[in-house]
Each structure stands twice: as structure tokens, then as C-alpha cells.
Amino acid sequence: MRGVYDIIAKPLGSRYNNSKSIGDKNLILNTEVFNHQYINREAEVTEVPVVNSLNLSKGDIVVLHHNVFRRWHDVKGREKNSRSYLKEDEYFVQPNQVFLTKSPSEDWSCVSGYCFVQPIKDTDSLSAEAERPLMGVVKYSDGTVPVGSLVGFTPGDEFEFIVGGQRMYRVMSKFITIKYEYQGDEEEYNPSWADSR
């Protein structure tokens, strides 16, 4: 089966990333189906669409929107699959739900309109925050902002993703508002729990 515009993909692992192995035990971190933070966002492309606007190939890995694999409850409390559900371990993915792509021989590349920004540590001795708000280093870019740039972005436009064990924010390129000069004391911030998911 092949979609005209929709990609068909399967999750890497399971639908939810809500458990952690500790020794020989498995610890469940979350039991709620509606919490978006524990939904798997990485998938493998199993079928490319007829209109392949993202130039994907079978076997490519994509980082996508959390609603693709999400389950939810209707007004009567019945658990349902997302509208993307095709059959067990296969889902329709619209091109606008994909943010990063990776073929087996290449590194991650951003879809047009998006950048992934890693936050930096807050070095202000008077601040109780671990990271500097609304600032970070561009790790993956669509080309509008150079990779490695220290940037600022507008509040409310950052969405948290874990990519390769690194916590990053997906920010639309148009919401990156300023490029800072490095001061020399910037250090990327990745909380210890990000590598454990």
C-alpha cells in the first residue's frame, strides 16, 4: 500500500517511551496515554508516498509530531488510536508532521522551516534556573540559520524533543529572532534524564 501524500512509518521501539531499565528491572515512568512527553517521536519509513516532497526513502528515520502514535480517550472514556493509525505498527504520517530526517548513511537534516536548538547552562549566580531561557545553540538547521550559532527565540515557540540522547527545542526558523556573539562562557545543557529515554 502506498499513499499519495502520506508517508507510512512504524515507530522505532514502541509507541510510548515510558519505561526505563534499571539493572534487570523495568521501571514504568508514566501510565497516562495523554501525556505527550512520553510518546515516541522517532519512526522508520516503511513506504514513501507517490508525491515525495521530502525526498524520503524506505528505511529513513524521521522525527515527527507526537500525535502520530498517541492514543486518546473519547467522551465516553473509550481508548482510541490517533487518526494516523493504519494497522498495528504502521501509521500514516503527513509531510507537515515530520521535522527531522535521517538516511542510514547521513546525519540528521531539518525539514524546511525548522531548526533544533540545544539549550545552554545558565551561568548567572543569582539565577535558580538550570538553563538560560529562550537561548541556545543551533544543532540542526534548515539552512536559514548556520549550525553552531548562538541564538535567541520568541517565548512559547519552542517544543522539547529528545534526539540522540540530547534534549533540544524544535523552533520554527522564523521565530529565531537574534543571533548572539559568543562570550566564551556558554556551555550546552543536557539534563541527565534526557540520555536515559
Image (cartoon, helix red, strand yellow):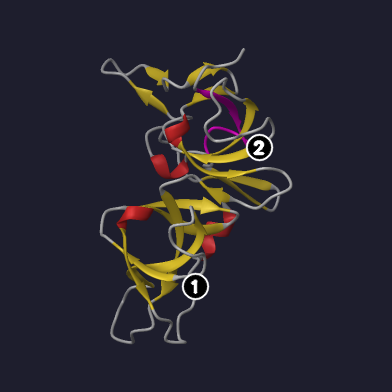
Nearest the eye: 195 or 180: 180
Disc on res. 188: 1
Check if residue 185 falls in the magenta segment: no
Nearest the eye: 195 or 147: 147
Q: What stretch is highlighted in magenta?
A: 6-16
Rendered view: 89 above or below 176 = above
Check if residue 14 falls in the magenta segment: yes
Residue extending furthest toward the top: 1
C-alpha distance separating marks 1 and 2: 28 Å
Nearest the eye: 113 or 123: 113
Horizontally, residue 76 falls left or right of residue 12, namely: left
Residue at the spot x=43%, y=57% of the render? 144
Whether residue 41 is visible to the viewer of this picture, yes or no, is no
Disc on res. 134: none
Residue at the spot x=49%, y=46% of the render? 29
For disc 2, the neighbor class at 10 Å (few under 14, some 14 to 19, many from 20) is: some
> To which quarter of the image does residue 58 belong?
top right
Horizontally, residue 39 falls left or right of residue 89, namely: left
Residue at the spot x=51%, y=52% of the render? 162
Horizontally, residue 83 falls left or right of residue 107, namely: left
Amino acid found under the numbered disc labelled 2? Asp
Task: For marks 1 and 2, give the one nearer the viewer.
Answer: 2
Rendered view: 66 above or below 105 = above
Whether residue 146 is visible to the viewer of this picture, yes or no, is yes
Amino acid found under the numbered disc labelled 1? Glu
Rendered view: 26 above or below 147 = above
Q: Dot 2 corresponds to which residue?
A: 60
Where the N terminus falls, by quadrant? top right
How far across and how far down the image is residue 84, in percent?
Answer: 46, 22
Q: What element carries label 1?
A: loop
Q: Is mark 2 on a helix, strand or loop?
A: loop
How far across and how far down the image is residue 191, in percent?
Answer: 49, 65
